Amino acid sequence: MHFKIAWRMFWRELRKGELWIIAFALVLAVVTVVSLTGITESVRSALMQRSSSFMAADKVLRSPIPFNSAYFDTAAQLQLTSARQMQFNTMVFADDVMQLVSVKAVSAEYPLRGKLVLKATDKIVELTPGHVYVEKRVMQLLQLDIGDKLSIGATELILGGVIDQEPDAPTAGFTGQPRILMHINDVAATQVVQPGSQINYRYLFAGTEAQLKQLQTSLEAKLTPSDRWQQVDRSSSIGSALDRAEKFLLLAGLLGIVLAACASAVAATRYSERHRMAVAVIKALGMTERQTKLLYFSQLLLITMLSMIIGLILGQLACFGAQFLIEKWVPDFVPVFSARPLLIGIATAFICSMLFALRPVLRLAEVPSLEVLRQGAPSVRLDVVHLVTGAVAVFGLMWMFSQDWVTSALLFIGCAIFAGVLLLLAALLVRIVKPVAAGQSSALQLALANLRRRLWANSFQLITFSLAIFLTLLLYFIRVELIGQWQAQVPANAPNHFMVNINDQQKLELTTALQQQQLSAGKFYPMISGRILSVNGEMLQEPEIPDSAENGQKSQQTKNDNKRQGFGRELNLTWLSELPTNNQLTSGKWFAAESRAEVSVEARSAERMKLTLGDKMALSIGGQEVTATVTSFRKVDWNSLQPNFFVILSPDLMVDFPANYMTAVHIPAERADLLNEVARQFPTVSVISVSAILTQINEIITQVSVALSVIMVLVFAAAVLVLIAQVQASLDQREQEIAILRTLGATKAFLLKAVVYEYLVLGLLAGGFATVLVEALLSVLQVRLFELPFQLHPMLWWMGPTLGAVIIVSLAMVQLRGLLNMPSAVLLRRALHA
Amino acid sequence: MNELPSVFIETRNLQKTVQLPSSSLTILTDINLTINRGQSVAIVGASGSGKSTLLGILAGLDQATQGEVFLAGQALHQMSDDERAALRAKKVGFVFQSFLLLPALTALENVTLPAELAGLKDARAKGLALLEQVGLAERADFFPAQLSGGEQQRVAIARAFITKPEILFADEPSANLDANTGEMVENLLFDLNQQQGTTLVLVTHKASLAERCQAQLVMQSGRLTRSTDSGANHAL
């Protein structure tokens, strides 16, 4: 029977009471969490799928030792699919023409992920034993047509087609030899594989995360020291980057969630104040305290369930929308449903409801029934328990999203300090104007007096709106000003294409070809791949990039900060006699003509490797070990878009090494057809378009901005909700004040002005605080992140306060308009009957 | 020779003291009274004389600091909050000065609320019948905000009688109403009271209303100084 009463009251209150604010706040919190988590999971899934296609498998085991069938047996037992792949370099012959090529021999199951497309003219063909499939330039180099024969080792194979699409093709431009694809069954016939041959054997596996994890565990004991699981660099770095992005987005979104929860707390407090008499009546009529608690707890539970369901549905719809967009970007994307965002959404709804709104509602049950005869005043003391449960909830949500105690604690303390500072500033400002407010002889003075009277509630609004405006301004200025400023740094005619794999002979020919087109190549930089092995005999610690399929929750690198940190990969090394123009020595001396075995290192990398001048660096270049003395550190202007190098060797070291060259050239957009001409004349030269990369970077920035804009909208919505809740909470008191003032002769215009002034001051303060914060943060980003010169942003200083004033005044007027226009008689009657 | 009616309410040496920040205030001192079943009693006195406090204790809404209170033979002074609430649900009806209808419920739902709390069947039918009696059957689905003061008080009276309480406590039932409406409400109260044979205890400033009751208890500075008419035994 009591549930029936609760249900009835619930629907009535939802329509016309404060429950809709609580409902809206909870919906907002759940939508924020579900959409942010779900969208990140979808993006992660898409990128993982894409990354797997980059590997042609979910997991790859590399080995220099011939295949061990036991590994494949283990995989089969775990119901994983597998494929084999061999890679080796060899000479191929077509009549009298020969060419060194990189051969990839694959089994029929290849690829396990991604697409392999082989074409003979325009027809798609299948990988077939007895045939080879080549890169286009191989046909040019060997002067072959489809159907021609070429010899690999002891066998002849037919050219079956061209490789049109290959999932695990190496990055274009930095590969050595042209590539050929063949069926693994043909390898034996080539007799290329001999004892001591340098062959890369790859085991490809595909399956679920659990299966792959089990495989790795099962094979651990069987692997040889030279076997390596391929750390899919892209996916690992993407996976861990996505982990960080998700945490950042959630923590940023947490601001909106906390604001929404605070709005629900304010609404719940008002709800309980307005229900004091109702509780006194039903207790007088015979309801016990326990039954009363149950009645109101039921209402809160109903509103939580309803809001949670709506929030989950809307959040999931947002996720579906994101998946729809992702499918356009990743054509083979298979949407995967994850329950995790929904579970987090459910947890968030209950945390916000129970820890923010429950206490004021349950305290209702403590209202004595005697209040039917003698109305008591609601307690004006700060409810410390409520404050503590709210703080616990905020910290709990921070931890749930960041999964890191330290980050949560730092963020929590940071927010508390921020709120405290704003509160102090607000209190100080209001005290400063106290003498002005004392008179109350004008609308402005009445407004200031009201501000002072409602200091605690107003400070809360101040904090929430300051934060919301801060986020809006920050986003705008980062996108428009900072990035624009950064892009403007790049000279108009800066190189926008890199040409690589240029051999010595081609340097002059290429320069001539470009000059004929009224273009000029930049300086030619010699390049070779190498790896830094040690410094002063001490091996470098390579960064562990966690495979997020293995360590789903571990996203931090475990590293010993005392050790020298390596790059974890081969570098493109160069050797120069002159210091590049966009490099600046920070210490040491550049190579002299008589310099022998010296090396110059980029300054930040040197810091990471804990280098000092005079250190001996050992490098592995082309299978040989080379030692060089560190003689200088350089600061590199990466914004110049010129070829830049972490490590530059003195020329004497590289005399006996072969080199490919790289240069940079500016090709105007309207002359883009020149690229085809270059490709035709110099088929072995690869051209990398920087503008395409810049466009991609811009796209990424745009996408990130979209994500941040979503958060900004959510935070703003939450801040608006808090303002609405606060204004609603003050309505009763305002109504009485207005009734009295009207009775005493105040006109509607006077009261309107007073309300406008009150919220105008609040808005200017909120906008002002936000402006100061944004300017401070922009300065840090400008100088530290974008490496731009410091400058103020004059536009910010009028945008911030104006935005605050306009928004807060508008919102307040929408809510108070009805009250201000109410006839005096009605106001008085309502005040008397209150 | 008339038989004495059975005692429904009795107090012995009742005292109520409240603690203030720096002192204590005695609101009621040495109240001894009896009210018989079916009797109508008015508690009168100046503002601040302790009328409402006494009403609250007699109704089980508050507890005395000292003394004993018996309602329907049960010792209120020995009961917990919940026990007194349960007793009120079964035996007590209320009419308040400010009507105190729940704004989220319709007129009918307000009337049936006590019956639902007491778990009575046919609450709706009983509620409609009572609304008919108070002349508001057509306003059953109206919310309190849509009713005039007099109409709200009539709904409150209907609410008070739905559980057929053994005793009705009324606190200034017509104070917020104009003279005509107030008189109508008072008539309704006494008519229903007579119909159901409920004991009636009301607090009032109005002499005319007090005179309609069978007995009057006069409060002055927290003490019961005088009573008029028979049927109510008291100690002065």
Image (cartoon, rainbow, N blue to C red):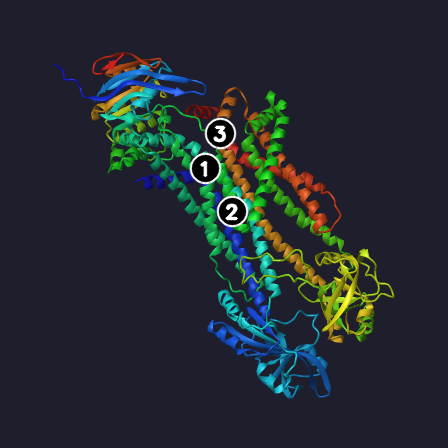
On the image, numbered disc 3 is attached to which residue?
A: A381
- CA–CA distance in space, label 2 to label 1: 20 Å
Image location (x, y in percent) of residue A137: 70, 77
- Compared with A250, A745 (above or below) is above
Q: What residue type is labelled 2?
A: Leu
Image location (x, y in percent) of residue A323: 53, 59
Question: Could you tell whether A334 is left or right of A627 in the image?
Answer: left
Mark 2 secondary-structure assignment = helix
Image location (x, y in percent) of residue A261: 50, 42
Is A146 in front, or is A190?
A190
Q: Which amino acid does label 1 sit on?
A: Ala
On the image, numbered disc 1 is attached to which residue?
A: A268
Q: If you read the primary sequence from the N terminus, does the residue marked by circle 3 or circle 2 appear first?
A: 3
Mark 3 secondary-structure assignment = loop
Chain under disc 2: A
Question: Could you tell whether A105 is left or right of A336 in the image?
Answer: right
Is A188 in front, or is A162?
A188
Question: Where is residue A282, by image quadrant?
Answer: top left
On the image, numbered disc 2 is attached to which residue?
A: A397
For the C terminus of chain A, which image quadrant? top left
Q: If you read the primary sequence from the N terminus, does the residue marked by circle 2 or circle 1 appear first?
A: 1
Q: What residue type is labelled 3?
A: Arg
Quick check: can you spot residue A106?
A: yes
Q: Which residue lies furthest to the front in this view?
A: A537
Quick check: can you spot residue A514?
A: no
Chain under disc 1: A
- Callout 1 touching callout 3 (CB < 8 Å): no
Neighbours of disc 2 within 10 Å: few (<14), some (14-19), many (20+): many
Image location (x, y in percent) of residue A361: 42, 37
What residue is shown at x 38% (from left), y 35% (from top)? B104
Question: Could you tell whether B125 is left or right of A254 in the image?
Answer: left
